[in-house]
Amino acid sequence: MGVLLSAFFWLYSLSAAIGVDGILAFPPYYPNADDEGMRHYYSAIAGATQLGMLIYARDWTSFGPSMVEQLTGIPNLVAWKDGRATSAVTK
């Protein structure tokens, strides 16, 4: 979802109430966010729900090893999808 965090919180509480099993968290829609901002963004989303969270990395995001390590500390992070359209990320 690419909406404001306040909308996330409302949607997550509603989703859990109707039986959704997890959430797919896209990155924010602004390029080149610093690591601290991205950590805060995903931590805030995860903290708003008990549902499992899948981070979906898109073309405008780039997570270095240190950032990935920080994000793996989120208790309800259950999966990670690298959706960047480049073979360079697999090298």
Image (cartoon, rainbow, N blue to C red):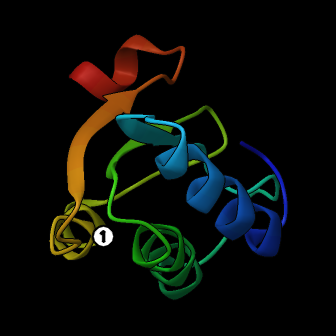
| Secondary structure of the residue carrying numbered label 1 | helix
**Residue placed most toward the observer, 22 or 29:** 22
**Residue placed most toward the observer, 14 or 90:** 14
- The residue under the point 71% across, 42% down is 1
Above or below, 77 relative to 41: above
**Residue placed most toward the observer, 28 or 17:** 17
Q: Quadrant of residue 73?
A: bottom left
Above or below, 2 relative to 38: above
Q: Which residue is mark 1?
A: 67
21 sits left or right of 68 in the view: right
Residue type at mark 1 is: Met
Q: The C terminus is located in which quarter?
A: top left
- The residue under the point 48% across, 78% down is 35
Q: Residues within 10 Å of mark 1 (few under 14, many from 20)?
A: some
Across and down, in percent, residue 44 comes to 52, 79
Res. 32 in view: no
Q: How many marks?
A: 1
- The residue under the point 22% across, 76% down is 70
Across and down, in percent, residue 87 comes to 38, 12
64 sits left or right of 35 in the view: left
Res. 83 in view: yes
Across and down, in percent, residue 81 comes to 35, 29
